[in-house]
Image (cartoon, rainbow, N blue to C red):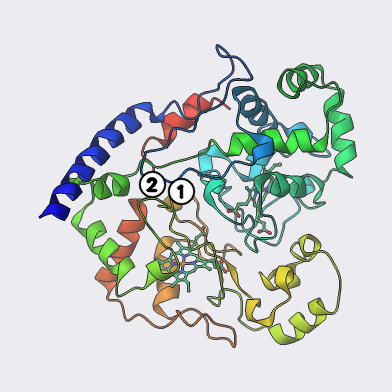
């Protein structure tokens, strides 16, 4: 009785905060720093039941930094030939991904992996499909000098280029109180902007908050399947305080194991001391996944469990973009993935009926933030 009662109060608080939250939501991405001072702390407006993400002590969020980072994120001058920005591959209009099978960088060069969304990246323990970066700052340094992506010859070359742009000189001076721009300033600002890209207002969130009619019957059945028969929740973990559908771990679900001698490839990769970021851009070795970072055989072909919020917006799917639709992803799981010596023990055939497959897809579609268009309009990229 006592428990029921407190559950009811919690639900009411949840609904109220959700309402306040949805009203305030569009403000999340509003360009700060105009009326307010650049030094003012930038407050992430999270619902009270969601755990605060970790913000590095040496890069606390300020309005000025977020605004500067936004400018940098959308600026093609960060690439060698002024044709590619972060937003080319993490485009707000495409769920902050790019809609392509694999990323396409300067001079039309195709990379080895699919571009993940930058939405909610602040909440993940690891960045990249193989987790080779632990912070958004560290992550942002890599695409800048990746010859297949933004192609700058070095971080120093970028610093030099940015330093010749007078608007940036004054912005960096206001935000970092220095005349000397560094690569760390640049990535700190970009990471700060990314930390504000949070979407937590979906039909599913309203359903969890107690609004039963927020989900269709099919999506409700899909949520049951996701937790039960379809076993999705074992890796795409969900709790009210960490509602991001990932266990922050790496699993081999067999995505790219077809027709490849992975043992031979792994032996070859293990024998080199090449840096994981270089191996991750090479088409063959990129498929080794987490192994590139740990060099442990159990991590061969293992990739990060991605969060699946706003998943309907970011087709195609999986680290190699090999599944074009959510229906085909479900079909992939229904078969139990692709058998291989390193397949995760949690993968097995699911025997889902056609209706059950549809229900799972309906559930995943209900993870789309319906105010994202407004969110983007406010962002005014
Ligand atoms: C040419 C396309 C391209 C460009 C340009 C690009 N990215 Fe990415 N981004 C990718 C791809 C592909 C991955 C995954 C690569 C991997 O796992 O090896 C990725 C991964 C990420 C991730 C990790 C997300 C996750 O869930 O693991 C973040 C964050 C990110 N990029 C931010 C940025 C920022 C910031 C910039 C600009 C400085 C940028 N990207 C430029 C294609 C691009
Ligand atoms: C054993 C852990 C595990 C289980 C169980 C699991 N997933 Fe995944 N999921 C992953 C991993 C790891 C990836 C990325 C794999 C890759 O690209 O190689 C992924 C990728 C996905 C993607 C693509 C995300 C993107 O951004 O491209 C979707 C959608 C998805 N899973 C849905 C599901 C559904 C639905 C179920 C249940 C039927 C499920 N998953 C069960 C670990 C798991």
Q: Disc 1 on helix, strand or loop?
A: helix
Along the line of sight, the residue nearer the viewer: 248 or 278: 248
Residue 275 point in image, percent of width and height: 82, 64
What is the secondary structure assignment of the residue under circle 2? Answer: loop
Considering every residue shown, the one lying at the far front of the view is: 2
In the image: residue 32, left or right of residue 263: left
The image quarter containing residue 318 is: bottom right
Q: Do the CB atoms of the residues marked 1 and 2 lie less than 8 Å apart?
A: yes
State the residue position of label 2.
368
The C terminus lies in which quarter of the figure? Answer: top right
Give residue 121's position: percent from left, percent from top: 56, 48
| Label of residue 313 in the image | 1
- Please tell me which residue is depicted at 45% across the width and 80% down the height of the picture: 347
Determine crowd level at label 1: few under 14, some 14-19, many 20+ residues with C-alpha closer than 10 A: some
Residue 14 is labelled as none
Q: Residue at x 43, y 63 (%)?
A: 236
Which image quarter: residue 354? bottom left
Vertical relation: 131 (above or below) 251 = above
Left or right: 192, with 209 as reference point: right
Q: Is residue 280 visible?
A: yes
In the image, the residue with mark 2 has its CB under 8 Å from the nearest atom of ligand 2:
no
266 relative position to 54: left or right? right
Image coordinates for residue 200, horizontal then vertical, percent = 40, 42
Q: Residue at x 52, y 58 (%)?
A: 316
Q: Is residue 261 visible?
A: no
Residue 366 lies, with reference to residue 287, above or below; the image says: above
Query: 170 above or below 3?
Result: above
Q: Residue at x 89, y 38 (%)?
A: 156
Q: CA distance from mark 1 to mark 2?
A: 8 Å
Badge 2 crowding class, 10 Å Cα cut-off, few under 14, some 14 to 19, many 20 or more, is: many
């Amino acid at each position: 009785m006592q428990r029921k009662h407190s559950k009811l109060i919690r639900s009411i608080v949840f609904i109220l905060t959700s309402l306040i939250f949805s009203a305030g939501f569009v403000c999340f991405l509003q360009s700060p720093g105009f009326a307010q001072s650049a030094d003012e702390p930038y407050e992430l407006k999270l619902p009270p039941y969601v755990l605060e993400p970790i913000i590095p002590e040496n890069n606390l969020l300020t309005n000025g930094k977020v605004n500067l980072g936004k400018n940098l994120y959308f600026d093609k001058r960060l690439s060698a030939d002024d044709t590619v920005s972060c937003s080319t591959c993490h485009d707000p209009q495409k769920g902050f991904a790019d809609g392509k099978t694999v990323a396409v960088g300067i001079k039309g060069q195709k990379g080895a992996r699919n571009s993940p969304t930058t939405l909610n990246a602040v909440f993940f323990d690891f960045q990249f499909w193989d987790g080779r970066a632990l912070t958004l700052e560290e992550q942002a340094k890599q695409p800048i000098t990746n010859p297949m992506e933004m192609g700058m010859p070095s971080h120093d070359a970028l610093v030099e280029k940015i330093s010749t742009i007078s608007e940036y000189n004054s912005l960096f001076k206001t935000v970092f109180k220095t005349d000397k721009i560094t690569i760390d300033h640049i990535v700190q600002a970009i990471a700060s902007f990314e930390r504000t890209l949070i979407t937590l207002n979906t039909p599913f969130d309203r359903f969890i908050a107690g609004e039963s009619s927020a989900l269709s019957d099919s999506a409700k059945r899909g949520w049951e399947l996701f937790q039960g028969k379809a076993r999705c929740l074992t890796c795409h973990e969900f709790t009210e305080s960490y509602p991001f559908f990932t266990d922050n771990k790496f699993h081999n679900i067999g995505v790219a194991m077809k027709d490849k001698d992975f043992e031979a490839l792994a032996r070859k990769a293990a024998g080199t001391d090449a840096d994981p970021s270089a191996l991750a851009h090479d088409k063959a070795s990129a498929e080794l996944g987490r192994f590139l970072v740990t060099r442990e055989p159990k991590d061969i072909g293992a990739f990060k469990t991605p969060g699946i919020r706003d998943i309907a917006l970011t087709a195609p799917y999986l680290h190699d973009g090999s599944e074009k639709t959510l229906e085909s992803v479900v079909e992939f799981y229904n078969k139990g993935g692709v058998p291989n010596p390193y397949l995760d023990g949690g993968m097995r055939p699911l025997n889902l009926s056609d209706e059950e497959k549809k229900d799972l897809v309906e559930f995943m579609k209900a993870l789309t933030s319906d105010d994202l268009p407004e969110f983007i309009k406010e962002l005014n990229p």
